[in-house]
Amino acid sequence: MQHNIMKTFNFVEVILWSIVLLLLITGGYRTHQFEIAQIDVFAVLLLMIGIRSYRHTSNFVSEPVKTIFNKIKIQFEKKPFQWVFSFFVLYTLIYSITLIQGHRSFNINAYDIGYIDQPIWSTAYEKGEIFLKSNLSRGLGSYLSEHFSPILALIAPLYRVYDSIYVLYFLQSFLLALGALVLYLLCVEYKVSNFGKVILPICFLLFQPLKTANLFSFREDVFFVPLLFLLILFLEKKYWVKFWLTVLLVFAIKENAPIVLFLIGAWLLIKKERLHGLALITISGAFFYILNSKITPYFSNGASQTLLVSRLSFLGSNFNEIFNNIFFHPFYSLGKFFVVKIEKRTFFYLLTLLLPFIFFWRWKPLKEYFSVYIALILILVNLLMTEHIIGFHYECILIPFLFAGFAKSYASSEKKLGALNLAAFAIILTLCVYGRSPILTLREWLPNPQHTCLEEGLKAIPQTASISTQSGLHPHIDHRKIAKDFSKIENANEDLIVLSAWSKISNYPNVSFSQELKKLSMEQTEKYKPLFESKLLSIFCKSGTCGYYQELGTELQKIKCLN
């Protein structure tokens, strides 16, 4: 009887692994009425079967699965770096292609890539007085009024080589995947086995917050992943020149960089690297205060207008008030935090972040496992400052510390649990919160003929024209001096208003332009006149400039699919 039960469980386990692999490779199937694409539920079943199996046999996987794992293990152990590099290339290609297809099918809008694409382009091609100039940004019209991210200027030379937003899609996937290669080097430093050196980067590339960060537009936060991994590696190896050069780059990523660098400074003190630790703590603390009280308010046109203040508005109306409440009224601030920020989704957010690691982490000695504590502190900062949703870039800053603690603990667990048990357990826990394969997104984002036609029409708009357009079209035509977000006719003053009423365009905020389009089409305003109108694309020219753009109207009439 017991033998038959074991055979049944073994059979079910093989089926579940087969389903998981099939969903990873194909993306599964999804309609409005039915879906079989979520991997989580099958991974949870595998976890339950694995725990039962381990209790009875001390093996987390059945014999049939163990045989397959052993064959994989042999291959991974022969050339671990080559395998990790292959996964790095595969990840970069899959996600780059997915994002490019998302762009071509108008599933990516100006929020947030439009805020970043135009500033990089203007840095590459314009010689203006405003650094990282953005028509979408507040204050002085620089992206620095949104976030302190001068590192974005380093991308500008790539736009001189290839003038396309596709550069950002590739770069984002490349930078996030690069974390796998640095994690491999960290595994070497922590003396993880050859098999583990491949398994950990696989878990990293399968980590849901990494996946969702990649599929959500482009943000400067992606630089945190490889650079903070490098910082941990240089710290562990005591490569101080490389460490401090990397620190300078991290400072240039975003205004929250001083927080993580302050924590790394504390880690250095605990490791008895007092000189480096005190220097980093002092510089980080001073820079955080100056940056958020002086520099960002200057670009944002007022201290009360910065994003940091807006996100912590429940603690005060300006930076100094928020700073005073946190440090001099901690219990008041903590009470406000629990009342305002803790919700039901907070617990799911924490589960997604912590489940793949919580069973592996070690906590002592402190100097060896302080990366775990840094990760937990950064999660607390995220709970304080961001929406508790996996799907943006906010987790990029803490992912390297989650996996650094994982790698350090993994090395000490291999002998105790066994290489195969540990690898299977790690992968299953990661898949328990994985969600859907990016292949499904790639399939759903394939452009149709109408998308291609609309893209062709937008390419006809001369780069010299100043435009006002909706967020769903903005990333396609923002490589120009003036490209603003359209809201109402009264607010527009550009040469052209470019709109589309097509429902297959991702717009944020999700507002209707039907009333504005009706006014423009029926010439109810003297400010703008119709230049070209079709179901897919409508362009209106400012009175007094229409003669200059008649050639554009004629060219659009020649595009048959638009008419």
Image (cartoon, grey):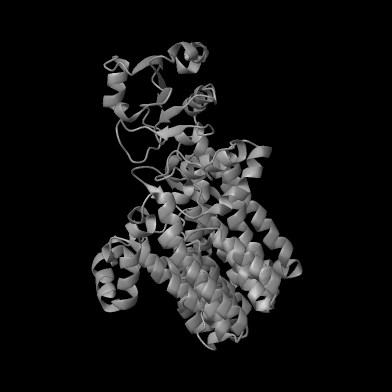
Relative to residue 432, is residue 411 drawn left or right? right
| 161 up-or-down from 439: above or below | above
| 381 up-or-down from 99: above or below | below
- For residue 43, say whether it is visible: no
Residue at 43% x, 13% y: name it. 546
Relative to residue 502, is residue 149 drawn left or right? right
Tally the marks. 0
Residue at 35% x, 52% y: name it. 305
* Quarter assignment of residue 246: bottom right
Question: Considering depth in this image, is 379 or 191 the residue closer to the camera?
Answer: 379
- For residue 484, say whether it is visible: yes
| 234 up-or-down from 484: above or below | below
Q: Where residue 174 sits: x, y (%)?
A: 62, 52
* Quarter assignment of residue 489: top left
Residue extending farthest bottom: 365
Q: Where residue 514 sits: x, y (%)?
A: 29, 26
> Dividing the image into 4 quarters, which one contains the C terminus?
top left
> Dividing the image into 4 quarters, which one contains the N terminus?
bottom left
Q: Where residue 523 sits: x, y (%)?
A: 30, 14
Residue at 49% x, 83% y: name it. 56
Q: Where residue 38 sits: x, y (%)?
A: 43, 55
